[in-house]
Amino acid sequence: MTDAYEKLEKSRKRITESIAQNIHLYGLPPSAGRQFGMMFFENRPLTLDDMSAELGMSKTSMSTSIRSLSEAKLVDRVWERGVRKDLYEVKDDWYQIFVDMFTVKWRRAVSLHTAAIRKSLAELKELKKADDITDELLALIETDIEKLLYIREYYDWLDRLIDAFEDQKIFDLVPRLEDEA
Amino acid sequence: MTDAYEKLEKSRKRITESIAQNIHLYGLPPSAGRQFGMMFFENRPLTLDDMSAELGMSKTSMSTSIRSLSEAKLVDRVWERGVRKDLYEVKDDWYQIFVDMFTVKWRRAVSLHTAAIRKSLAELKELKKADDITDELLALIETDIEKLLYIREYYDWLDRLIDAFEDQKIFDLVPRLEDEA
DNA sequence: CGTTATGTACAGAAAAAACTGTACGTACGA
DNA sequence: TCGTACGTACAGTTTTTTCTGTACATAACG
């Protein structure tokens, strides 16, 4: 038979590659997914040099992608006494990983959109008051205002949705079943 | 004062640009976001030529990006009698747009991951039975199996989460407030 | 049935993103 | 305090993605 270690490696590689192909949902490139997958199967915190050796990529790349992984809250930096190098390990709660990614990414989007809407809405309301406005233009302004009010409402909903994830209420609607193994 | 039309345009541009900067959350490039934003403010269905003229981009680009927008369920193709060209307009229910994107993108990811996990799990269970396995390797196999069981559970949760979006249960947890204007 | 308009496949160009190696600032250990 | 090891900024290179123009297949109209 072929080497059993090879088979184990093959099994891991399949999962890792699957993660790599889908990590774009977290806004990260495939190589960051590979890094995450590799770290997931290592049962210890890794240094940048470890990762570099394991993945055959430059330490610089490891450094930048580990930062992305940190910002997306997929990995944690950990300390170990006597070890000078930075150590990282993957978070072990995947439910929370999902929730964190979701809240981080969407909260920022909502915040940016909301600011833009507020500004434009103010401008349009001001513009409506001007007296050198044709009826045709006025109609345009008013439909635009309608539209902005609608999407503002939508972003308010999205904000509340993010809240529901952040404060774990989502698990009331869709429970984790892990406890009843 | 400056031209009122310019001001209207500026207001629209701010929103459109905000969409363009965040459309990556839908897996689409900024230009598709610009296209969507522009269509959002036009109060009529547009042809590829309209879009090309409006955005100053090639018709080919319009064709490919409108397909992406369609697949992501952000726009619809509509028919108008007497018009030979294809007509497109943005969907007007942004809540549903969000739900559709979410379900489409994540369902595919869950499906791919689940298949990979199933395969690897089967391989590892088989491998465990082999009799030329050292204790050390056996331990590795068993922790890998543990891990795969855990993430399988997680993907099951994710699948149920997607169900909750798809069948609109999410609106029980986080209601739309639009009706009470 | 022929003609013309329309959308898209495809190949190449342009732009953006990812990756690498060097060089440097910082902090830890002797 | 000095020396060394570490992480990262930065510039340049490679790879990937996006965009364009041409050429073609298809379908609508006379």
Image (cartoon, coloured by chain):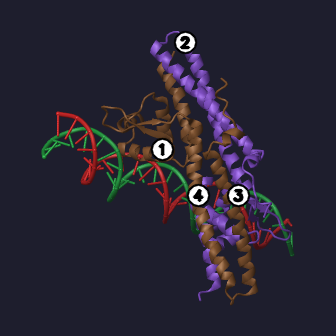
Chain colours: A brown, B purple, C red, D green
Q: In what element is the residue under mark 1?
A: helix
What is the three-letter code of the residue carrying label 1? Leu
- Mark 4 and mark 1 lie on one chain; the one further toward the N terminus is 1
Which of the 4 image quarters holds residue B122? Answer: top right
Residue picked out by circle 2: B130
Total labels: the figure holds 4
Q: In the image, what residue occupies the spot 66% across and 64% down?
A: B36
Q: Is residue D25 above or below residue B167?
A: below
Chain under numbered label 1: A
Q: Is residue A48 above or below residue B146?
A: below
Residue A94 x/y as whole percent = 57, 36
Q: CA distance from mark 4 to mark 1?
A: 19 Å
Residue picked out by circle 3: B74
Q: B1 left or right of B81?
A: left
What is the three-letter code of the residue carrying label 3? Leu
Callout in the foreground (4, 1): 4
Q: Are marks 4 and 3 on the same chain?
A: no
Q: CA distance from mark 4 to mark 3?
A: 17 Å
Residue picked out by circle 1: A69
Residue picked out by circle 4: A109
Residue B62 x/y as whole percent = 65, 64
Which of the 4 image quarters holds residue B24? Answer: bottom right
Quadrant where the C terminus of chain A lies?
top right
Q: CA distance from mark 2 to mark 3?
A: 52 Å
